[in-house]
Image (cartoon, grey):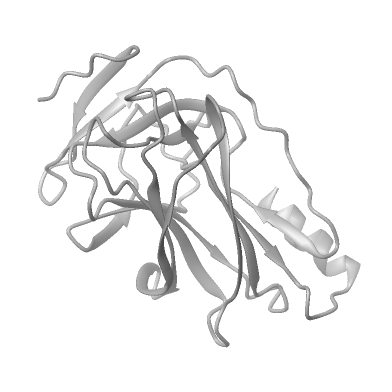
Amino acid sequence: MRTAASLAALICMGVVGAWSADCIVDGAPSHFAAAARAGSDATLELKWDNGTRLAFFATGTGAGYWVGNDWDLSAIPRYRAITKIKVYSCGDWPNRRWDGFRLGIYAFAGGTPGSLLWGPTYFKPTRTGDGWCNYSMGWTLPAGNRAFAAAAELYYNWPNCDSFALDTNPTFLNHSWRCQNGRWEKLPRLVGDFRNLMLRVVVNNTAFDIAPTSVGRVKALYY
């Protein structure tokens, strides 16, 4: 087991079997509540988190350690352009500086993240403290790929890495994932029953038009 010296860190073992790496968790109370964004007729912010951070987490070996959320845009096929990936992270823990991580978009067929469609792209946040780190992009999902997973790779080893966040909702919404050694599975329990990853995407229908009623349906689905 590693011992974390910064902040009020707790250390927990990963699940048995393939998940053998140490998981390091900062359980300090959240002081940042993200404001909900409803988007517009042209853009939608897709999320599974409730906007309030419970804890940050990292792992001993960052290379190949991915976490992500899945979405299915089958009900709104014209929203295929991904304009932003948002990751809730912290520049103060575990080492009081930004180190950067990688982002990627994966196909989501058969109920599991699959082949890499976009990236991996290195991203080093510049904001201060903890909060949403926004990576702006302009990329359109290939035709036929309505379902996808947006993911972030820890990339660097503990403690020279950036952390990812879980929200305060104890009900797992069944859309957060973890990958290690090339194997994806649903995000395991790292802090009690809290398993919803704070990672979002903003999608756009720039090249298309969509009826307002359809926008209302997708907002009801994701908000």
- The residue lying at 45 percent from left, 29 percent from top is 91
- Observer-nearest residue: 109 or 123? 123
The quadrant of the rendering that contains the N terminus is: top left
Q: Position of residue 215 (x, y in %)?
A: 81, 64
- Observer-nearest residue: 128 or 55? 128
- Observer-nearest residue: 60 or 214? 60
- The residue lying at 43 percent from left, 26 percent from top is 55
Q: Position of residue 22 (x, y in %)?
A: 16, 34
Question: Is residue 222 shown above or below 158?
Answer: below
Q: Residue furthest toward the bottom?
A: 143
Q: Residue furthest toward the right?
A: 212
Q: Going by the image, does 138 lie left or right of 154?
A: right
Question: Is residue 93 shown above or below 175?
Answer: above
Q: Position of residue 110 (x, y in %)?
A: 39, 75
- The residue lying at 76 percent from left, 55 percent from top is 219
Q: How many marks?
A: 0
Q: Going by the image, does 144 lie left or right of 10?
A: right
